[in-house]
């Protein structure tokens, strides 16, 4: 999830933030367990 304020940055900066966010690979960490639960509910297989 990515939340950025509409008035806090310009439109070009928002685009760059989104590019970096989606271009960065998920590293796991503390959210791995939660993501595994979502995948189990949605029927994903590892």
Image: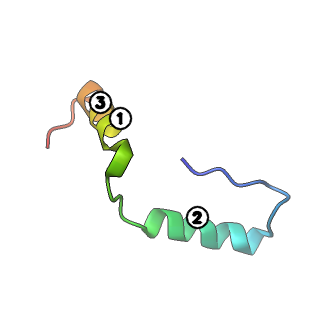
Q: Residue at x 37, y 45 (%)?
A: 30
* Closer-to-camera residue (32/17): 32
Mark 1 is surrounded, within 10 Å at the Cα level, by few (under 14), some (14 to 19) or many (20 or more) other residues, namely: few
Q: How many marks?
A: 3
Residue pointed to by mark 2: 18
Q: Position of residue 13 (x, y in %)?
A: 71, 73
- Element class at badge 1: helix
- Note whether 30 is above or below 13 in the view shown: above
Q: In the rendered structure, find residue 34 and report the number of the disc placed on it.
A: 1
Residue 40: quadrant of the picture: top left
Compared across the picture, whether 44 is left or right of 31 comes to left
Nearer to us in this view, 33 or 17: 33
Q: Are marks 3 and 2 in contact (CB under 8 Å)?
A: no
Q: Is residue 39 above or below residue 8?
A: above
From the image, which quarter does the C terminus lie in? top left
**Residue underneath mark 3:** 37
Q: Are marks 1 and 3 in contact (CB under 8 Å)?
A: yes
Q: Quadrant of residue 7?
A: bottom right
Q: Residue furthest top?
A: 41
Task: Specify whether 43 is left or right of 21.
Answer: left
């Amino acid at each position: 999830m990515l939340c950025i304020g509409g008035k806090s940055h310009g439109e070009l900066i928002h685009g760059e933030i989104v590019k970096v966010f989606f271009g960065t690979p998920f590293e796991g960490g503390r959210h791995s367990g939660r993501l595994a639960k979502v995948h189990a509910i949605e029927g994903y297989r590892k």
